[in-house]
Amino acid sequence: MRKISSYAVLSITFLVTLLLNINIDSYPPIAKFLDPFQGFWQNAEVRPLQIPTSLSLAGLQDTVQVYFDEHLIPHIQAKNDHDLYFAQGYITAFHRLWQMEFQTHAAAGRLAEILGSIAIKHDRLQRRKGIVYAAKNGLEKINQDPVSKEIVNAYTAGVNAYIHSLTYKTFPIEYKLLAYKPEDWIPLKSALISIQMADNLGGYEQTLQNVYAFHLLGETKCSLLFPEYDVFHKPIVPKNTPWLFKPLALNPHFIHPQAIQHDLLPSIQQVEKAKQKPVDGSNNWVVAGKKTVHGYPYLANDPHLNLRLPAIWYGIHLQSLTVNVTGSSLPGTPGVLIGFNETIAWGLTNAAWTVRDLYTISFKDATRAEYHYDNLLLKSQFVVEEIKIKNKEPIYDTVVYTHLGPIVYDDNFEDPSHYKNVAMKWVGHHPGNEILTFYLINRGKNLQEFESALEHYHVPAQNFAFASVHNDIALEIAGKLPARLKNQGKFIMPGNSNAYELQAYIPQAHWPKIVNPSVGYVSSANERATDKNYPYFYYQFSEETYRNRRLNQVLSQAKKVDTKSMMQLQNDNFNLAAQENLPFLMGYIDSAQLGTQEQQAYQTLLDWNFQNDIEQVAPSIFKAWQDQLADKLWSYSHNYQLEIRTPNFYQTMSILKNHSTHPQLELPAQDDLRDLIVDSFKSAVQHLQAWQANHHKLYKWGDYHAISIPHLAFLKPFGVDHVQIGGGEGILNANEGSHGVSMRLLVSLDKVPKAWFIYPGGQPGNPGNPYYTKFLEPWSHGKYIPLTLTIPQDDKKSFYSRVTLVPA
């Protein structure tokens, strides 16, 4: 693992490397950038915290104390809520301003203003998805509530107080490097941060892939390859749970994918394959007091996201007369998103319910001014987007809006799959008041108050885990969940009739949830929420098949849970896929027919304990075998010039074990199947030998599987490569590529709650700060730092510095 120090980052070697690794339209004035009194040298921070011990700030109503602990986590103590969120805005900006602002530029489709022409396509896509439109609607909801309006405005004022204190000398280094300056923060930017996260978590849909698969493979084969339910899976809410409510009465209408066959297929014959994106998942669980050593619940949460530097999360402790809460905040928004207070704790995982629908629009003519809808012609709305470009004239893009949402792709803007004139109807375009939700949760005292706070929550659909000192535990799927017809949300639907539109949303009283189960725990790891007896149809665009079952195996057997065992479970590297499937695969191999290297690999797998630890080579062999097997078995997908997804490994093995002779699948016969498995094993060994020769080292899992954490703007010297960490895809310690465990939180709901957390990065966002990656090594080794609801004391080791904020 490569550590970043202020001296290494700020060397001449760094400058040369940086200029060779970025691609922007222009560089900053070199003389100004190298100025020893104002330029990038000023961003070298020998001390981790460089802030005056007293600051006079206009906008404060009273004195605020900010205590930084030894990890630079701020403990903000205010006498009123206005000052609390003002100070949160100021302190977060002090550490993370560039990150906050760059993310809002990215969300709003304004990156070309900073990066130049290279970002035009990204900016057009953001405009066409209606991200700013969604954020404006979200801000309108915020402003309708006096509480959320006040805290967002106070947070905004705090951010601006910091911005206005800056000069070129004190600008974060990315501003100097990219030759621009911060602009004033506005409440819309906080709404943009929330909407962008909702887009990231709900943005990968499979509707178009499902259409392609249906028409090219047929309905029977699709059902075998991609079943909606698996009888062996255990959902979040246990099977056969009675639903004690009367479901909404929906007008019955079966949506068949044949309905859109002729609309799409003619335009997709010469399509380049799009690379499948990682699906953002997560783990969370709660263990009831009857299964713990101290008789109180434990709550654990680790969200899985695209890993970036500066880190996604920012640890913070907020205390006023109305609240005492700590945990992980999202830089750019007020409050604590995942954390705990004196009586409750909560955590989130992605529910992966489809809340974004695509509809084909039938325009009257090429002007697209009107479109057909039942027996009517509805008028389109045209929004002209001005996209400013660094050092160039702006360009203009016209986005067509229908009542079903914006047209993302058309003749003027094509996606890799070449579908066009499809409107995107997304719950996120009309969000709830998510900021109010977390304001109330931060102050929640019991399960009733927690559920009341969720009334304001719309997007993205999330699995909320809950625990309290009263020994209540719960897990609830929350959000504005569509009450769907069969197949609605699974396929692109015709947009020319009301018959295909959503009729209603599932009432909160009908949301899937589980409260105080007799088994003594609740958990989620992105598996299905319910069995097929749940009275509402929903399509889940991704579904976990190994992490969730491994988690439930451990929790069901646990009896006296303590802090150590919970930490071990969060960092669990056990490969359930290997344990379940290696005996079957290796049963087809005759070791006497293998070469020397193949026999060594075979024996290594026989001796494996199924742990994906960094020093082992068996995980690398198994992963290479998985990849080669899938590649050879599902070679049908290579025969089409479009994006056809393939079954995941769980489904692949289920088919080989249970359906290999099904005539629809055209899989190899028994002898051919043996050849397929043996050939894929040999190919895996050849692949690993080539990897070893190329890298001049043994393919230990830590090297073969090494992950990277790039900089948010992909400035290579500000990122970290070759991070060795165990785990992997389908494993609780889920890290793959530059995607993985963005934070770990563990809370013990004792009489005095205790907590521990860690994330890959550090509190400061400045690459020249020695704490920029302070948490990275302990994160990769499964270690934690404590979180507390108490203020550090000057005479204690945990205390680092105190800053007093006073009204100007």
Image (tube, grey):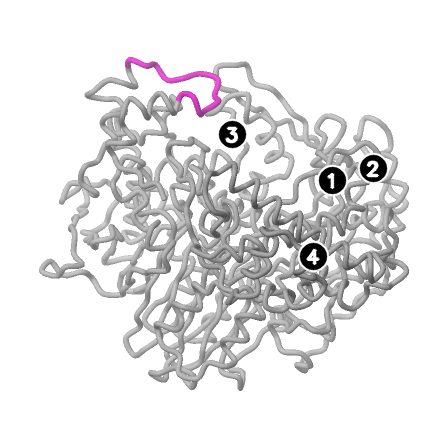
Graded by Cα atoms within 10 Å as few (under 14), some (14 to 19) or many (20 or more), the crowding at tag 4 reads: few
Does the magenta segment cover residue 26? Answer: yes
Tags 2 and 1 touching, CB below 8 Å: yes
Indicate the amino acid at tag 1: Thr
Determine which of the numbered discs, if any, sits on residue 371 in the image: 2
Quadrant for residue 424, please give it: top right
Left or right, 457 with reference to 353 = left
Measured in 3D between alpha carbons, the distance from the residue under mark 1 to the one under mark 3, in whole angstroms, is 24 Å
**Element at label 4:** helix
Determine which of the numbered discs, if any, sits on residue 110 in the image: 3
Q: Earlier in the sequence, mark 2 or mark 1?
A: 2
Question: Measured along the vertical axis of the image, is residue 568 above or below residue 159?
Answer: below
Give the residue at x 58% y 70%: 549
Q: Nearer the viewer, mark 2 or mark 3?
A: 3
**Element at label 2:** strand
Determine which of the numbered discs, if any, sits on residue 525 in the image: none
Q: Earlier in the sequence, mark 4 or mark 1?
A: 1
Indicate the amino acid at tag 2: Tyr
**Element at label 3:** loop
Disc 1 target residue: 402
* Number of numbered labels in the structure image: 4
Q: In the rendered view of the protein, which quadrant contains the N terminus?
A: top left
Residues in magenta, as a range = 19-31
**In-front residue for pair 262/218:** 218
Disc 4 target residue: 593
Instruction: Give the main secondary structure of the magenta stretch.
Output: loop
Tags 1 and 3 touching, CB below 8 Å: no
Indicate the amino acid at tag 3: Arg
Q: Earlier in the sequence, mark 1 or mark 3?
A: 3
